[in-house]
Amino acid sequence: MESITVLGIMGLGGQEIFLVALFVLLFFGAKKIPELMRGLGQGINEFKSATKDVKENIEKSMEDPK
């Protein structure tokens, strides 16, 4: 079975990915990209943390009926 990737689902090929990367590089500049990626990583970590907290609260409320 072939593995399905996000890019395969969206129908993006190598040329489209290259054009998007080139656009981002031209639009933001090489110095801003690491800052953008760092901010994106922090946002993802915060989202994971919040998701984990919500999951723990739901599990606690299911264990301890009042």
Image (cartoon, grey):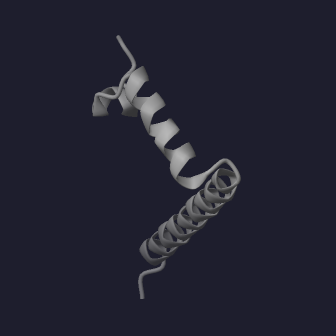
At 38% from the left and 34% from the top, the residue drawn is 6
Report the front residue among 21 and 42: 21
Query: What is the quadrant of residue 40 in the picture?
Result: bottom right
Q: Is residue 64 above or below residue 31?
A: below
Report the front residue among 28 and 42: 28
Report the front residue among 21 and 58: 21
Q: Is residue 59 above or below residue 29?
A: below
Q: Is residue 65 above or below residue 31?
A: below
Question: Where does the C terminus fall, quadrant-wise?
Answer: bottom left
Outermost residue to the top: 1
Q: Is residue 10 above or below residue 33?
A: above
Percent position of residue 38, x then y: 67, 57
At 63% from the left and 56% from the top, the residue drawn is 41
At 66% from the left and 56% from the top, the residue drawn is 32
Question: Where does the N terminus fall, quadrant-wise?
Answer: top left
How many discs mark residues in the rendered view? Answer: 0
Say whether residue 63 is left or right of residue 6.
Answer: right
Percent position of residue 30, x then y: 67, 47
Percent position of residue 21, x then y: 51, 38
Percent position of residue 5, x then y: 40, 28
At 44% from the left and 72% from the top, the residue drawn is 58
Outermost residue to the front: 26
Say whether residue 55 is left or right of residue 12.
Answer: right
Query: What is the quadrant of residue 12 in the picture?
Result: top left
Report the front residue among 45 and 49: 45
